[in-house]
Amino acid sequence: MQIFGVDIGGSGIKGAPVDLDRGDLTDERYKVLTPHPATPDSVADGVKEVVDHFGWTGPVGVTFPGVVTDGAMIRTAANVDKGWIDTDARVLLGGRLGGAPVTVVNDADAAGVAEMAFGAGRDRTGTVIMLTFGTGIGSAVFTDGVLVPNTELGHLELHGHDAEKRASSKAKEDHDLSWEHWAHRVQQYLAHVEMLFSPELFIVGGGVSRKAHKFLHLIEGVNAQIVPAQLQNNAGIVGAAMRAAHGA
């Protein structure tokens, strides 16, 4: 079975058809830059461009970098235009896609769902936390495989700031941090999250997961196992398609 997945991020909108039996893309993903400002209409245009690239006409799962309720309603918009707040994204995107059924889910929740089914969290019990490092920091918390949605742990306070302002991939780029310096910030963040939730496993996702060998070994003093996401930056696309298949 195939469903189309789209991952809306702070820097890019990417998508592809997904084989739900294998948990993998059936074609090379297509990506467009996230518009700035990332208003609902401009982002919807980007989603349409990605979906139209493949000539897809069936159901579509879409991730969003913020709190999403009922598979449709946007409640927060930290890294996109505030005009998204209280937008029914299912109606907006479904209309832009010619009436296609659309399911919308928090981006990190989608990535986590995919990793728990097909990646680093497969067959794991206890508390598992997926953290996606990109424009911000997304989070997905699982207890014995059950998702606690919309946790948004990237907005925990760390040294007087939102954690994502210090430890996201964007923070590394903005402040031209070395891998060692950035890993120290990530270590402080993980230690804070571990103090609150005591997970058995951290899964590190987002685009930076492709470079896990550059920084994971530098993180010390965290009791939980720390592993890179196996689906890497495709996890959000796969998870979006999975949620669409089950109507969120």
Image (cartoon, rainbow, N blue to C red):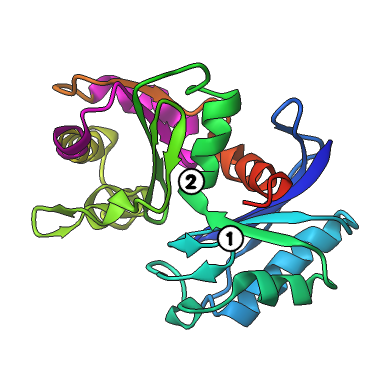
Q: Earlier in the sequence, mark 2 or mark 1?
A: 1
Front one among 233 and 193: 193
Q: Is residue 231 above or below residue 108?
A: above
Q: Which residue is mark 2?
A: 109
Give left or right: position of 3 versus 130.
Answer: right
Q: Secondary structure at mark 1?
A: loop
Is the stretch drawn in magenta largely helix, strand or loop? helix
Q: Which residues are magenta?
A: 192-218
Q: Amino acid at mark 2?
A: Asp
Q: Position of residue 15 (x, y in %)?
A: 70, 51
User: x%, y% of residue 82?
Assistant: 43, 80
- Decide: few, some or many residues near mark 2? Use Cα within 10 Å; few <14, some 14-19, many ≥20: many
- The Cα–Cα distance between marks 2 and 1, rounded to whole angstroms, is 12 Å
Vertical arrangement, residue 134 with respect to residue 39, above or below: above
143 relative to 175, above or below: above
**Which residue extends farthest left?**
159
Q: Which mark is residue 167?
A: none
**Percent x, y of residue 69:** 49, 63
Point 32% across, 24% down: residue? 216
Judge whether residue 8 can be spotted in this image: no
- In the drawing, what numbered circle is on residue 71? 1
The residue lying at 61 percent from left, 64 percent from top is 33
Q: Is residue 209 magenta?
A: yes
Q: Is residue 74 left or right of residue 168?
A: right
Residue 65 position within the rendered picture, expressed as x and y whole percent measured from the top left: 47, 60
Q: Looking at the rendering, which quadrant does residue 46 occupy?
A: bottom right
**Nearer to us in this view, 88 or 24:** 88
The question of residue 139 being in magenta is answered with no
SS of the residue under disc 2: helix
Q: Quadrant of residue 29?
A: top right
Q: How many residues crowd mark 1 within 10 Å: few (<14), some (14–19), many (20+)?
A: many
Residue shown at the point (18%, 23%) measured from the top left: 222
